[in-house]
Image (cartoon, rainbow, N blue to C red):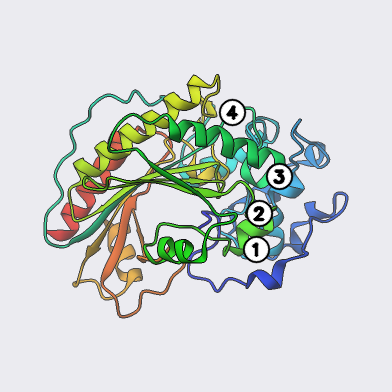
Amino acid sequence: MDCCSEIDIKMPQLSDIKGLMPQLGNNFMDTTTWVADDDCIVKKVFKVTDLTNLADAETPLGWTLNKATICAQKLKQHVGVYAGDDESYTLFAPVFDEVIKQYHSVNVKTNKAQREDYGPKKLPDLPEGAIVSTRIRTARNLSNFPFTNNMTKNQRLEIETILKDVFNGFEDERLKGTYYPIEGMEPKKMQELTDAHYLYINDDPTLELCGTYSDWPAGRGIFINDNRETGVFIVWVGEEDQMRIMAMNKGSDVQAVWDLFYVGLQAVHEGVKAQGRDFAFKESHGYLSTCPTNLGTGMRASVHVNLPNFKTKDKLKEYVKSKGWKIDIRGTRGEATNTDGETVYDVSNKERLGSDCYTQIKTMVDGVTKLLE
């Protein structure tokens, strides 16, 4: 699911947007023609920033401001801008830096992000009983490659080949598993993975429009561990980011899920480095991602928790905001889903940039604990 679409709006069907292309020339710079309203972050940035000198600028890998903002031009959006490669954050800094400041409340000119150290970390316990499930995920991309929305078919296949070699090199018994390419996947297996809520599909209009699904399903797939006694470890290949690395399990044992997630993240990173490559990272921005909302750690630690005292998501969000807690509230089926009549919510860390993984996951745990008091 993309991270830039506006929350709680009715998104168009994929069939409604196929064929939409970026406008020619500099016409896209006129934000009065954009579908996104004035609350869209990138639209607000365009209105107050002179970007004339960047209108025709292009990164070495072919990304432009026109491509970066196509979703805000054509759809309702909350953030509305995507990077197409590492260089996007440098060449188009007047746009991305301000978007980042408005979304994360962090100035990347002074920010000092830290690389993951993969050392042991002891997390506070989550209360038992009301927690349905626990999940931790992060976004990663390889440096010196275009992001998923900006790739050729051959580049998609190259990334897939690199990561298949990484998966084959796992030595930890908790991680060893199977990679399932979406291309050529048996319908029975696809249905099984979909029913288990493991597999992603090409159903997001925003990602479709910005180029993420081009050449579908070439180079896309999902790696899943075989031994799931301590949790499910998954790597999505070729979705919004080149890698979405995640661990999950039923119940409230956040420490077990964290341990599986972190050892898996380390194994992927070491496997990538063994091939002479590395994750895309800038000290000012942290780990680079397609959507600027995922910069920094890229981590989203969440639980599905039953909160019967809050009958609607909006009331819960208002309460959290009034307390100043840095946690995010969503429905259990995504940020844009209707939750009327349900009291099980997805609660996660809100910060990704400006703090480390431990701080972010502890913030989530502390917030959930307070909600259950």
Asked whether the beta carbons under mark 2 and mark 1 sit within 8 Å of each other, the answer is: yes
Q: Amino acid at mark 2?
A: Lys
Name the spot of residue 41 as percent of width and height, x first. 58, 52
264 is higher (above) or lower (below) than 119: below
3D distance between C-alphas at marks 1 and 4: 31 Å
Q: Amino acid at mark 1?
A: Ala
Mark 3, Cα crowd under 10 Å, few <14 / some 14-19 / many 20+, is: some
Q: Nearer the viewer, mark 1 or mark 3?
A: 3
Mark 1, Cα crowd under 10 Å, few <14 / some 14-19 / many 20+, is: many
Disc nearer the start of the sequence (4/2): 2
Instruction: Tell me: 150 left or right of 245.
Output: right
Disc nearer the start of the sequence (2/3): 2
Disc nearer the start of the sequence (4/3): 4
User: Mark 2 highlights which residue?
Assistant: 43
Name the spot of residue 30 as percent of width and height, x first. 79, 56
Mark 2, Cα crowd under 10 Å, few <14 / some 14-19 / many 20+, is: many
Q: Amino acid at mark 3?
A: Lys
Give the image quarter of residue 157. top right
Give the image quarter of residue 368. bottom left
3D distance between C-alphas at marks 1 and 3: 30 Å
Name the spot of residue 100 as percent of width and height, x first. 54, 41
Q: Amino acid at mark 4?
A: Ser
Disc nearer the start of the sequence (1/4): 1
Identity of the residue drawn at 17% across and 54% down? 370
User: Mark 3 highlights which residue?
Assistant: 153
Q: Secondary structure at mark 2?
A: helix
